[in-house]
Image (cartoon, rainbow, N blue to C red):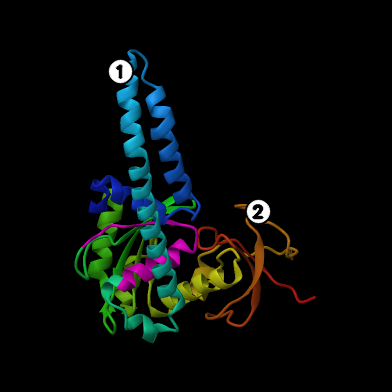
Amino acid sequence: MPRNRRQENPLDAIFDTLVTVPIWVGPVLAGGTYVALRFIWPAAFSGEEATQTFMRGIGQVAAPWLALVLVFVWLAAEYHKRKRRQLLEAQTGIDSIRGLSWQEFEHLVGEAYRRRGYLVEETGTSGGDGGIDLILKGHGETVLVQCKQWRTHRVGVKPVRELYGVLVSERADRAVLATCGTFTAEARAFTQGKPIQLVAADELVELVRSGQDVSSSGASPASEPSGAQLAAGVTAQTVDPAPAMTCPKCGGAMVLRTAKRGPNAGSCFWGCTGFPRCRVTFPYKEP
């Protein structure tokens, strides 16, 4: 599995962890480190009084400095998260997304998936092409993501084949290829029956907007599937569930949605909030 070179440094590994956790974890970590070094660690040494005095002195000196370093790392992680949030909230459509640099594009895609409840690891690859850019972990799966910041280019089947090879060799659950452009028919045909999701310009805008909706409402992330995604989902059942009904497959809440494209465009249906991990749907019956 590709790994971020930053994790070779312990402080960088702590930074990468703090980026993925709630804001209160940093102060708790710094305070706990201070207490452990200042009081618990010296007490763990039994024996001569001289040894205990020496260890107590080390703890007195090291505890405040290490706690201060952790506070700075925490502040840097919070600034990092704030910049990512601002980047996502600033997007107004595909034109603004196409105006991003390839690094910003990767950060945007990562933040959009972070809003969906994934832990996002940026692998630290250099250059605007090639390799796995993000590793997503959450919802019981590991997902490899490659970002193609091609503004008008149609992505052909070759990058998709290469991504599938990495997916198989790394034994991940599935892979995502995201681009500002489009995919050729051959590329889309290659993904049939394979755990690869192609995110073209339209799907990318929906992904970003769903993240913006989560931020503004505080609700659980929900996506409106396309006609093709509905066709790939669970066969609709003949019951009309109440809004409070839970999904019979994963236990998530069922919410009312409107299909945006495909043969059922404009029609309402009940969909699981666990989409795309869970694709259970029910037809909506007018009261």
> Which is nearer the eye, 27 or 232?
27
- The residue carrying pointer 2 sits among few (fewer than 14), some (14 to 19) or many (20 or more) residues within 10 Å by Cα, namely few
Q: Residue at x 54, y 58 (%)?
A: 278
The percent coordinates of residue 12 (x first, y second) are: 29, 51
Residue 20 seen? yes
Residue 197 seen? no
Q: Residue furthest left?
A: 127
The percent coordinates of residue 197 (x first, y second) are: 39, 65
Q: Residue at x 34, y 21 (%)?
A: 52
> Amino acid under label 1?
Ala
Q: Is residue 209 left or right of residue 131?
A: right
Q: Which residue is mark 2?
A: 248
Q: Residue at x 30, y 48 (%)?
A: 11
> Which is nearer the eye, 91 or 26?
26
Q: Give the answer, above or below, for where 224 lies relative to 234.
A: below
Q: Earlier in the sequence, mark 1 or mark 2?
A: 1
Secondary element under disc 2, as helix, strand or loop, is: loop
- The residue carrying pointer 1 sits among few (fewer than 14), some (14 to 19) or many (20 or more) residues within 10 Å by Cα, namely few
Q: Residue furthest right?
A: 287
Q: Give the answer, above or below, for where 213 lies relative to 51.
A: below
Q: Give the answer, above or below, for where 88 lies relative to 120.
A: below
Secondary element under disc 1, as helix, strand or loop, is: helix
In the image, which is nearer the foreground, mark 1 or mark 2? 1
Q: Residue at x 32, y 68 (%)?
A: 106
Disc 1 and disc 2 in contact, CB within 8 angstroms? no
The number of discs equals 2
> Amino acid under label 2?
Pro
Q: Quadrant of residue 271?
A: bottom right
User: Is residue 107 one of those drawn in magenta?
Assistant: yes
Q: Which residue is mark 1?
A: 50
Numbered range of the magenta stretch: 104-125
